[in-house]
Amino acid sequence: MAFRKIVKIDEDRCTGCGLCVSPCAEGAIQIVDGKAKVVREELCDGAGFCIGVCPEGALSIEEREAPAFSEEAVHEHTKHRPKTYIPQKCFHCGNTEDERILIPVKRAGDSLWVCVRCLPHLIHG
Ligand code: SF4
């Protein structure tokens, strides 16, 4: 166990839409009985790429005692995991990752995706 950052899911807010599943490269989040769940805590690295995609504000990061993050567990888990793919969108223009390359950014505590066409405008105004 370790005192560390890990995702917290507010089940009352979660609608089970599934948008948070594919941003988690580690496969830590799955929809179980209509709600998002961290299926194994050692798969969640607490990076928070899932947070910005939740339309309900159901995701946050907390610091608490949890099993240490394990790259080995992620490797084993993602090897057998069925592929789920929900394309992410640029928060600025709405284009998806199928149309443009997206880059993760942080803004006012939110984890967001921005496309390479919008990023220069955001940097230079
Ligand atoms: S994106 Fe939000 S509302 Fe949708 S499944 Fe994930 S936690 Fe639930």
Image: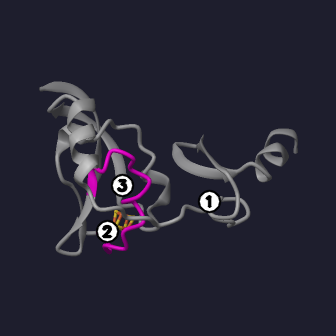
Instruction: Give the residue pinned by disc 2.
Output: 13
Q: Amino acid at mark 1?
A: Glu
Residue 28 seen anywhere in this rendered image of the structure: yes
Magenta includes 19? yes
Please report the residue visible at 37 percent of the width from the left and 64 percent of the height from the top: 84
Residue occupied by mark 1: 97
Q: CA distance from mark 1 to mark 2?
A: 26 Å
Q: Residue 93 placed where, x, y %?
A: 73, 64
**Range of the magenta residues?**
13-29
* Residue 20 found in image quarter: bottom left
Question: Image quadrant for the C terminus?
Answer: top right
> Is the N terminus in the top left, top right, bottom left or bottom right quadrant?
top left
Residue 70 appearing in the image: no
Task: Indicate the position of residue 30 as horizontal and vertical percent values.
Answer: 26, 61
* Mark 2 vs 3, N-terminal side: 2
How busy is the neighbourhood of tag 2: few (under 14 within 10 Å), some, or many (20 plus)? some
Task: Name the residue that disc number 3 marks.
Answer: 59
- Is ligand 1 within 8 Å of the beta carbon of the residue shown at mark 3? yes
Residue 57: image x %, image y %?
41, 61
Residue labelled 2 has its Cβ within 8 Å of some atom of ligand 1:
yes
